[in-house]
Image (cartoon, helix red, strand yellow):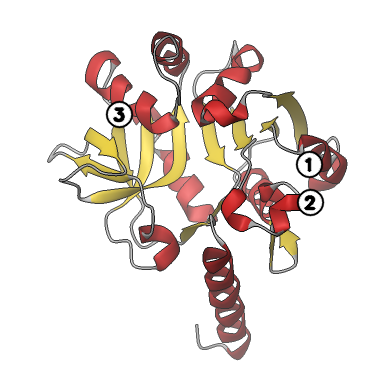
Amino acid sequence: MKTVILAAGRGQRLRPFTEKYPKPLTPILGKPILEHTLALIRNVGIEDCIIVTGYLGNFIKKRLGDGSRYNIKLHYCHNPYYTLGNAVSLKAAEKMLKDEEPFLLLMADHYVSQNILEKALESVNKEPLLCVDERPRYPPQLKDATRVLVNSGGYIIDIGKKIPLWNAVDTGVFLLDNTIFKVIDALEKTASLLTITNCIKHLTLYKKPVWACDVSGRLWFDVDTQEDWAFVESFLCEALKCQERGTG
């Protein structure tokens, strides 16, 4: 299995850092958030990773190289049209995934715990799937969250930032197959901004059901703003102190 990490976005809400560097290189505990993600996917046994770059993508390639120092094989593809939506960035990786089914899809601005990836991989027989949190509690999980409505059978029936009825939020961890590219092809003819959320909604309505893999209680954060970054940095620093004291 391969992993695709979308690392193309402009990250304007994380300025001034993103005026000089791409958002995925935002440091968390002294290390770029993207490096935390690479360590996780290697820990769960994945050795191949495709990184889709866009804004200041040369900085990412220079920092990560071929992946050998992370014990992982890195491949890059560039999306010059990253302002058109993150599904356009996923589309850029399609040729590199031709023989891969399914694949893990991650967002480069999300900090996730290893047990979320493990839960997704354990549930591979239920893909396509999106890992959801039914009990979000921290500001970087709730603010600007993509809402998800899950039915009693555990499948997604609606998704979007402004849907009125919802019972979970999107964590940014997906297991998908090549069907997603058929959805992107269908939607890009009419959409001015094409997001993964749009595509998941279309997929679950018209192609095949998308399972909601419940990872409630596991740690994850969406690092979109300076406030998010400050919260995550403080939270993780305190968690490390608790571990060192043996109280957490």
C-alpha separation, residue under disc 1 versus residue under disc 2: 12 Å
Depicted 228 relative to depicted 172: above or below: below
Q: CA distance from mark 3 to mark 2?
A: 38 Å
**What residue is shown with label 2?**
20
Closer to us: mark 1 or mark 3?
1
Name the amino acid, label 1.
Answer: Ile
In this rendering, would 234 be left or right of 127? right
Task: Give the residue at x 72% y 24%.
Answer: 77
Identify the secondary structure beneath mark 3: loop
- The location of residue 99, given as percent across then percent down, is 59, 11
Q: Dot 3: within a 10 Å radius of its alpha carbon, few (fewer than 14), some, or many (20 or more) residues?
A: many
Q: Earlier in the sequence, mark 1 or mark 3?
A: 1
Q: Residue at x 46, y 42 (%)?
A: 173
Where is residue 232, by image quadrant? bottom right
Q: Is residue 35 visible?
A: no
Dot 1: within a 10 Å radius of its alpha carbon, few (fewer than 14), some, or many (20 or more) residues? many
Q: Earlier in the sequence, mark 1 or mark 2?
A: 2
Circle 1: element type: helix
* Quarter of the figure with residue 9: top right
Identify the amino acid type marked 3. Val
The one of 41 and 171 positioned closer to us in this rendering: 171
Q: Residue 204: x and y, percent?
A: 27, 24
Residue type pointed to by label 2: Lys
Left or right: 4, with 177 as reference point: right
Residue 143 screen position, x and y as percent: 38, 59
Q: Nearer the viewer, residue 245 or 35?
A: 35
- For the residue pair 70 and 122, the one nearer the viewer reads as 70
For label 3, the residue is 210
Please give the name of the residue rendered at 65% of the width and 57% of the height, measured from the top-left corner. 15
Q: Which mark is residue 60?
A: 1
| For residue 3, above or below residue 33 | above
